[in-house]
Image (tube, rainbow, N blue to C red):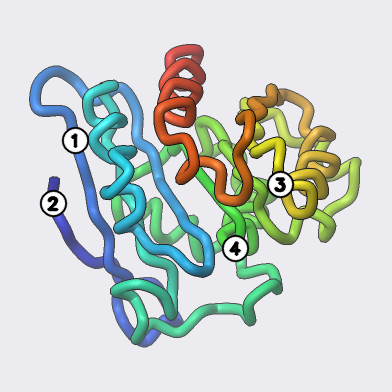
């Protein structure tokens, strides 16, 4: 487990990240973990997702988004709830050599991940949205044009953002769905074991 920072154009200050890698053997794939508005990369460390991914043979990078966590001094490229430029995550992935990358995107981070997904499919190995915001800002045709394998995750008690995002993201051409029972928003915090099993099972299909 290591820590570092990456500078993205227009952010004024670097973005902090935590990284985990397998202790032995080849890296099977790279995973970028984003987070919600009340959270940071520390959550992925605390619930064991970074460790789980490393044990599954992945290089996992969890960044603190601009203005949050240990990236508080960095300036966000768009207001909360507005779409960020697709080039934002493109630059993060290029600078950290993460392409093709699996993107895990809960809640707030949808404003970053969705433009990236729609405009830079070639850089994305798979997409794992967990009730992201901004799903209503794209058309059914735009979603249908995305061929990236996607795993839509939501908790069955998340009757607001979870159901709204599921309805929109179900238009993705190549998707499957995992419903986490008895889990609200964010469901991965309520039931990390189920989350990790679903995550690893999906990654093993790629």
Disc nearer the start of the sequence (4/2):
2
Q: Which residue is mark 3?
A: 158
Q: Which residue is mark 4?
A: 108
Q: Which mark is residue 78?
A: none
Disc nearer the start of the sequence (2/3):
2
Closer to the eye: label 3 or 4: 3
Spatial separation of the CA atoms under disc 4 and disc 2 = 25 Å
Disc nearer the start of the sequence (3/1):
1
Q: Which residue is mark 2?
A: 2
Disc nearer the start of the sequence (3/4):
4
Closer to the eye: label 4 or 2: 4
Spatial separation of the CA atoms under disc 2 and disc 3 = 33 Å
Q: Contact (CB < 8 A) between labels 3 and 4?
A: no
Q: Which residue is mark 1?
A: 21
Spatial separation of the CA atoms under disc 3 and disc 1 = 32 Å
Q: Does residue 179 appear to the left or right of 164 in the view shown? A: left
Spatial separation of the CA atoms under disc 1 and disc 4 = 26 Å
Q: Does residue 174 appear to the left or right of 20 in the view shown? A: right
For numbered disc 3, what is the local secondary structure? loop
Task: Where is residue 46? Give x, y as percent.
Answer: 28, 49
Closer to the eye: label 3 or 1: 3
């Amino acid at each position: 487990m290591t820590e570092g920072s990456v500078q993205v154009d227009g952010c004024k200050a670097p973005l902090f990240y935590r990284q985990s890698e397998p202790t032995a053997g080849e890296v099977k794939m790279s995973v970028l973990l984003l987070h919600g508005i009340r959270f940071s990369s520390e959550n992925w460390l605390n619930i064991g997702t970074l460790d789980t991914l490393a044990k599954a043979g992945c290089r996992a990078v969890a960044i603190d988004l601009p203005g949050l966590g240990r990236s508080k001094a960095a300036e966000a490229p768009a207001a909360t709830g507005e779409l960020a430029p697709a080039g934002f995550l493109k630059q993060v992935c290029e600078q950290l050599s993460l392409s093709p990358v699996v993107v895990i995107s809960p809640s707030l981070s949808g404003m970053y991940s969705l433009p990236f997904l729609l405009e830079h499919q070639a850089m994305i190995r798979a997409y794992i949205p967990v009730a992201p915001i901004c799903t209503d800002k794209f058309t059914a045709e735009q979603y249908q044009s995305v061929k990236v394998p996607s795993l839509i995750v939501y908790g069955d008690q998340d009757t607001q953002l979870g159901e709204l995002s599921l309805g929109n993201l179900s238009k993705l051409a190549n998707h499957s769905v995992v419903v986490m029972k008895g889990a609200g928003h964010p469901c991965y915090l309520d039931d990390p074991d189920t989350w990790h099993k679903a995550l690893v099972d999906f990654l093993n299909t790629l």
